């Protein structure tokens, strides 16, 4: 019964696709019709071909999607946590929080990499800058990608 249902569903899909008569590309046309078109993500260079440890790669994925469990997010779930940043004690910890401890550490890493330090920016501007520096196959881009991933994941791991 399940096989018959699948065959009927496949028949409906084939009927929906505007096929141009070409034997070698009918399967390809059906495949691309079934495949939903998603926009390309700009941050993929942080994930792919990154030789940092998998745990760090997963942690870097979280802030990109706004899912990093910072104290402000935990407080929204009514979890009792200390709201201040444990490193700088200056203000509430959030994704956009500009921790002085993390900033000093990152400044030293950028100095070692001979990369200009970006000043106060929004999260979107920061991510554009990170993606620009992490793109490419150069050794500098690879090292930047690893160090950025580890710098972001270090406090959480």
Image (tube, rainbow, N blue to C red):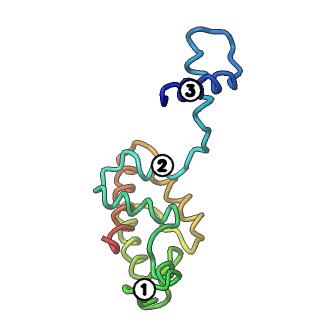
Q: Residue at x 43, y 76 (%)?
A: 103
Of residues 94 and 45, the one drawn nearer to the viewer in this rendering? 94
Q: Reading the chain from its start, which is encountered first: label 2 or label 1?
A: 2
Q: Helix or strand or loop: what does disc 3 sit on?
A: helix
Q: Residue at x 41, y 51 (%)?
A: 47
- Relative side of 105 to 136, left or right: left
Of residues 88 and 5, the one drawn nearer to the viewer in this rendering? 5
Numbered label attached to residue 44: 2
Numbered label attached to residue 85: 1
Vertical placement of residue 35 versus 109, above or below: above
Crowd class of label 3 (few under 14; some 14 to 19; many from 20; radius 10 Å): few
Q: Reading the chain from its start, which is encountered first: label 2 or label 3?
A: 3
Q: Helix or strand or loop: what does disc 1 sit on?
A: loop
Crowd class of label 2 (few under 14; some 14 to 19; many from 20; radius 10 Å): some
Residue 144 image point, x, y percent:
38, 56
**Residue that badge 3 annotates:** 31
* Cβ–Cβ under 8 Å for marks 1 and 3: no
Q: Residue at x 50, y 54 (%)?
A: 131
Crowd class of label 1 (few under 14; some 14 to 19; many from 20; radius 10 Å): some
Q: CA distance from mark 2 to mark 1?
A: 29 Å
Q: CA distance from mark 2 to mark 3?
A: 24 Å
- Relative side of 32 to 58, left or right: right
Q: CA distance from mark 1 to mark 3?
A: 49 Å
Residue 122 image point, x, y percent:
60, 70
Numbered label attached to residue 114: none
Residue 72 image point, x, y percent:
50, 82
Tell me the quadrant of the picture where the C terminus can be found: bottom left
* Cβ–Cβ under 8 Å for marks 2 and 3: no
Q: Helix or strand or loop: what does disc 2 sit on?
A: helix
Residue 104 image point, x, y percent:
39, 78
- Relative side of 59 to 130, left or right: left
Of residues 2 and 78, the one drawn nearer to the viewer in this rendering? 2
């Amino acid at each position: 019964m399940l096989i018959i249902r699948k065959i009927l569903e496949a028949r409906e899909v084939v009927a929906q696709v505007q096929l141009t008569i070409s034997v070698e590309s009918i399967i390809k046309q059906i495949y691309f019709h079934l495949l939903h078109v998603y926009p390309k993500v700009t941050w993929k260079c942080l994930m792919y071909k990154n030789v940092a440890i998998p745990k760090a790669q997963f942690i870097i994925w979280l802030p990109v999607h706004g899912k990093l469990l910072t104290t402000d997010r935990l407080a929204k779930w009514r979890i009792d946590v200390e709201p201040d940043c444990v490193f700088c004690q200056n203000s509430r910890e959030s994704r956009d929080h500009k921790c002085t401890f993390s900033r000093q550490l990152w400044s030293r890493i950028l100095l070692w990499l001979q990369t200009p330090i970006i000043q106060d920016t929004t999260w979107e501007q920061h991510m554009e800058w990170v993606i620009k520096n992490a793109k490419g196959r150069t050794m500098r881009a690879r090292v930047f990608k690893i160090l950025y991933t580890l710098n972001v994941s270090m406090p959480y791991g």
